[in-house]
Every structure is written in C-alpha cells, then in structure tokens.
Image (tube, helix red, strand yellow):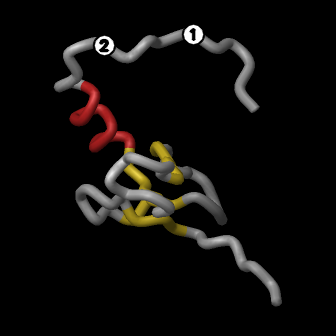
Amino acid sequence: MTHEKQEFVVCNCCGELVKTEGVPPYGEGLEVTKTWGYFSGKDGERHHFFLCEECYDRMISGFAVPVEIEEVTELV
C-alpha cells in the first residue's frame, strides 16, 4: 500500500484549499491531532483538523490569554 502526499489540504473552518506540495508558493496553516483520554466526554476518539493561516489568526485573536510568540531565525 502506497501513501501519496496530498498537494492540497482543506481548511476545516473556511473550506479553502491550501497548497502544500508541488510548485511554490505553498500555504501555511495549523494541523492538530488530539486523542482524547478517559473522563473527557470523547473517550477514545481521535480528532484531526487543519486551519489555514487566516482562520488561525481569527481564532487566536479571541483568546483571553494571548498566544506566546517566539522569534525563530532558522527555518527548516
């Protein structure tokens, strides 16, 4: 069984296609995978989603405690 990389990923919030492979430019976003444990109300469920950069910015703008941001000078 072969796993082919997807060229695009879909933002779960707005539905935008974000290009992740192929010819640049590429999009950025936040990919989250969470496996819920006991006593959570979601016992044994794994949730996975992707947010494009714009939806991520919109989401964190409403946080009561701001996201901690650290400058990185070497990007991989």
Question: Left of 73 or right of it: where is 33?
Answer: left
Foreground of the two, 62 or 57: 62
**Count of number-bearing discs:** 2
Q: Quadrant of residue 50?
A: bottom left
Where 52 sits versus 46, above or below? Answer: above
Label 2 sits on residue? 66
Q: Nearer the viewer, mark 2 or mark 1?
A: 2
Label 1 sits on residue? 71
Badge 2 or badge 1: first in the primary sequence:
2
User: Which quadrant, please, contains the C terminus?
Assistant: top right
Name the residue located 24 percent from the left edge and 35 percent from the top edge. Answer: 59
Name the residue located 47 percent from the left edge and 49 percent from the top edge. Answer: 38
- Describe the element under mark 2 as helix, strand or loop: loop
Where 22 sits versus 54, above or below? Answer: below
User: Which quadrant, please, contains the N terminus?
Assistant: bottom right
Q: Amino acid at mark 1?
A: Glu
Name the residue located 40 percent from the left edge and 65 percent from the top edge. Answer: 10
In this view, the residue farthest toward the right is: 1
